Amino acid sequence: MNSDRLKLFFRFLVRGVPIRYVIFFLCWCVAATASAVESKADAKTAAFYYGPDIPWASLAVFDFPVVEPNQADTVPQAYQGEHFYAYVSLGEVLAQRHYFSGLDKAWLLGKNPDWGSFILDQSSPALRSYFIDAVIEPLWQKGYRGFFLDTLDSYQLVAEDDAARERQQKGLAALINAIAERHPEAGFIFNRGFELMPLIEARVDAVAAESLYQRWLPSKDQFAVVPESDRQWLLDQFEQVRERYGVSTIAIDYAPPADRDQARKIASDIARHNVIPWVTNPALDMLGVGELEVIPRQVLMVTGGSKESTWELSMAVLYGLMPLQFQGLVPDVRVIDTPMPAGTLAGRYAGIVVWLEDPQARSDEFEDWLALQKDNGVPILMLGFPAIDPKGSHAEDFGFISRGTPTSPPSIHYQHPDMGFEIPLPGLLDVSSPLDSKEANPWLELRSDNQTLIPVATTPWGGYAFQPFPIRSMMPGIKEGMNRWMINPLTFTREALKLPAMPIPDVTTENGRRLLFAHMDGDGFPSLAEVEGYRNEADALVLLDEILKKFDIPTTISVIEGEVSSEGLYPKMAPELQRIARAMFALPHVEAATHTYSHPFFWYDAQENPGELYGPEGQLRLPIPDYRMDPVREVVGSANYIERELLPPGKKTRMVLWSGDTIPTPEALKAAREGGLLNMNGSNTTITESAPTWTLVKGIGVPKGDEFQVYAPNQNENIYTNEWTGPFYGFERVIETFKLTETPHRFKPVDIYYHTYIASKNASLESLRRVYQWASEQPYFPLFASQYVRKVLDFNDMVIARRGDEWLIQGSGELRTLRLPDELSFPAISGSDGVAGFREDKPGRYVHLSGGRARWQGRVASGDAIPYLQQANGRLTAFSRNGKRLQFSLSAMAPLAFTLANVEGCTLRHQGNIIKPIGRHGRFNRYRSAARELNELRLQCPH
C-alpha cells in the first residue's frame, strides 16, 4: 500500500467513516496493489452510446457500458443485472432536462456559451440534495447501477480564484459521496475530474477523458490529430490515477463512421498505453470500436411497392429473410414510407437491403436518407428496382449511369458463375432498369446498341440486382413453386453486404444434431373419422390412439376453445372432445398450446372488424354467437381455458399457434408476449423434389415493431394435399422437404406439422404414421416446439464480438449452437470457456456451447488432443473441464446417445460405474444409455 493510500486510509478513520467503507477500502487497496504488479494491459472494456434505440444486448458485453438515460424509459428487465451506467451531467445542465424547472436560480452560476447550458453551483447543499432526489434517485429506480459523471470541471468557466474552485471541488465530491452513502453498491466513472479523486470516498470504477489520439473540432466541423504534448499530459494523468487509486482509465476518441479501419487503428494505439479505448463518432450515437468489437448483426430491410394486402406478403419478406437470417443477420423490416431508424446506423447495422417492387415507391426524402447512410459506410443492397433514381441527384454518388431502353435484344457479355443459379438465363433478356455503373464488379454485363448495361453487380458501397434478375418466374401468374433464384442469394448478399466471416448462431441444431419436434393445429378436432375401426368417432381420438400413444416424438398439441368447450359450437360433443384433449395433454411427450378462441382466418381484417363475421376476403372467424373479436381473448383467454379445464396439475399452456392466414397483428403478438405465451406458425417452407428451389425455403420469423412472429420451420399437410383436395397421402412428401433442407445446407430443423383432421382419412393417417416412423429412425435431437421458439428469440439477441483473435459470445443460453464458415478454424478447446465441443462433418461445422456465454481462440492447424463432446441427442445441463478431465450432465427426450472425441485411454464413469462405448471410430467413442438423464458423468484421462 503506497503512501497516498495510507494517508487516505487514516483520513477515513479520523472522519469516522462507517466500518463497511473502511473494509471496502482495505480490499480495494489490496486489489489495486495486486493489479499494479500484474500485466500492464487493462483487460476491461467500455462503450459509450448516447443515441436512440439503445442496443442493450450489444452493450451488455462490455464491462463499462454507458448510455444516455433519456433515450429509454428504463433499463430492460433482462439487463438490469448488467450494471449499466447512466450519463449524468454534474457540473451543468441543459434547459431541456426534466429537472431544470425545479432548479433555484441561485444554483446557477452562469452559462457555457459553447453548449448553451447552465453551470451549476454544487457547493450548495440544497442543490446537492435536490440533485440526488430529482436526478439520481429516478435513475436508480429505472435500473441503473452506475453513473458516468460528466462536466466535472465546468466550474472552471466561472470560478475566479482558488477559493472558489476549492468550494466547487468539495461540493462535487460531497455530492458523489452522498450518492454512494445512499446507494453503496453504485459505481462511478468520471469524465476527467482528476482533481476530485483525493476527496472521493465512493467506488470509482474508471476515469475517462476524451481525445487521446484524435479529437473532433465542432467549430471547424472536422477531425484533428491530438498534439503530442496534449497526449502526453493526458497519459500522465491516466498513469497517476491508475497508480494512486487502482482504477481503470478510458480514452474516448473520435473518427468518421465510415472509416472503421481508422477507428480500429486508433483503438489499438490507445490500448498500447494500458488505457481502455472507445472510438466513436462525435454524436456518440453509433456503436463504436474498442479492443472488443461487436459484430453488427442487425440488417435494415426496407420493402416498398408491393401490391399484396399486407407487407408481410412482400417479396422482401417472402424471399429476402432466409438468405439474411441463415447468415446470422437479424432483419429490422420497415415499409419505405414509414420512419427509418434514427441515429447513426454504422456499427449497429450490418447493412441495408431495399427491395422495391415498384420504382415509384421511392421518394426524394428516402433517397437523401439512403445517400447519408452510404456516406456513413453502411453497406446497401438494392433488389427489384433502384432505390436511387438513376437520373436523379444522387445517381452519381452511387455510380449509376442511366441508359436508354435497348432497341435490340441485349446479349450476355459476362456472367458471374453464381448467375443463373436455379434456372438458366433466358435467351431473350429484358431489362427493367437500363443502366451502367462506375466501379462496379459486374455479376451480369450485357451489350446492346453499342452500350453496356449492368443490371446485377456488387460495388464499393454494396450491390444491386434489378428486375428480373433476383427472382424469375418459370410460369408468370403462378406465384408459389414456380419462382427461381437467378442469383445465388447466399453468396450475393454476403459479397454485397461485405459480411465478415463470423460464428453464426444456428437454430437448427444442438450438440451437433438436427432438432426434431412436431406440432398440431387444432382444426378439425370435432370432425368425424372415416378410418376403419373409428368411423363416426372424433378424428382426435384416432390421432391419440394411432400416433401420439405409439410415437414419443415431442409434440405440441393445440385446440380451438370455441370448438371444444361446453359453451362453444359443439356442446353435445364437448364432453368427449375434452376427455380426448385431457388424455393427449396427460402424455409426457405432449405440451399444450392454444389455437385461439374463434380461429381468426384473416387476422388484420378480423381485428379491424371485430363485430363482423365476413370481410373482403371471406369468413373472418368461426361463428361464435355474441362474440366480438379481441386479440387478448383469442390468445390469452383461450390459453387460460386450456390450462384451467384440460391440463393435468403442473402443466402450463406454453404457446399460441397462429390460425388462418397465420399473419397475426402486432396487437395479437403483444397479447401473447404479455400473457407469457410463446408464438409460432406462418410462412411456407415447402421445397420438394418437384419444386427444388430455395424460394420455397423461408426465414425463421419476422419482426413486427417491438414484437416477433416465429415461423413454423415446415408446412402442414394442407400444402402437400393441394388444400385437402387430394391426394390424401401427399403429406409423406414432407420427407422430401426435410431432406432438401438438410443438404447442401441445414436450413431447417425437422418439424412434423399437421392438423387434427389428418387423422380423419386412412391415406392421410398412414402418411402421418410414415413421417413419424421415418423421423424416429433418424439421429436427431428431440425437443418441444416451445424450446425451438426460445432458440429463435435468443438468435435475435445473441451478441457476437471479437477481441483480436478471440471470439466472445453472449446469449440467454437457449441457443447453444454456432455454425462456422469455412474461413474460420474450430476452437482451441484447451483455452476455451463455455465450449463443450464441435462437429465438423457435413452439412455444417457446428460449435456446441455449454451455456449462454463462451469465448475461444481458433486452434492451430494441428489442433489439440483435448477431449470434447462431438455430438449428443440431449442438452447439457452441466459442464466443466479441468485439463483433460470432463464432468457433465445430459438430459434428453429419448434414450441418451452421445459421442466423445479424443478419449483414447480415458474412462467414463457415472455414479462410480464405468460406461463403456458401444463403438469406436477413429478419434470418436460412441455411448448409449436407456436412461434419458445422466447427471455428473465424469471422464478421467491420463495426463
Image: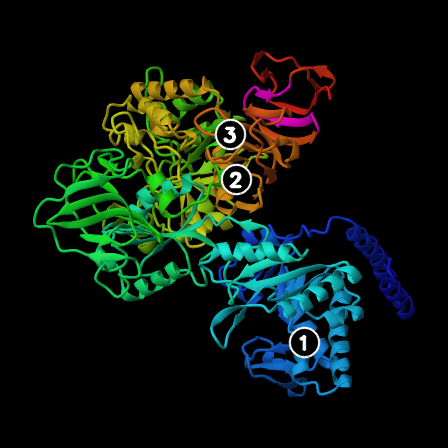
The amino acid beneath tag 2 is Arg
Residue drawn where x is 32% and y is 22% of the image: 732
Q: Is residue 145 part of the magenta span, yes or no?
A: no
Give the colour scheme shown: rainbow
Which marked residue is nearer to the observer: mark 3 or mark 1? Answer: 1
Q: CA distance from mark 1 to mark 2?
A: 63 Å
- Badge nearest the viewer, 2 or 3: 3
- Chain part drawn in magenta: 883-903
369 sits left or right of 656 in the view: left
At label 3, counting other C-alpha atoms closer than 10 Å, the crowd grade (few under 14, some 14-19, many 20 or more) is: many
Q: Which mark is residue 153?
A: 1
Give how far apart the Cα atoms at labels 2 and 3 are. 25 Å
Relative height, residue 733 to residue 199 (above, below): above
> Image quadrant for the C terminus?
top right
* Residue of label 3: 783
User: Mark number for residue 448?
Assistant: none
Magenta stretch: residue 901 in it? yes
Q: Nearer the viewer, mark 1 or mark 2?
A: 1
Could you tell me if the residues under marks 2 and 3 are in contact, i.e. CB atoms within 8 Å? no
Residue 289, position in %: x, y? 54, 55
Locate residue 9, reporting x and y percent.
88, 63
Q: Which residue is mark 2?
A: 644
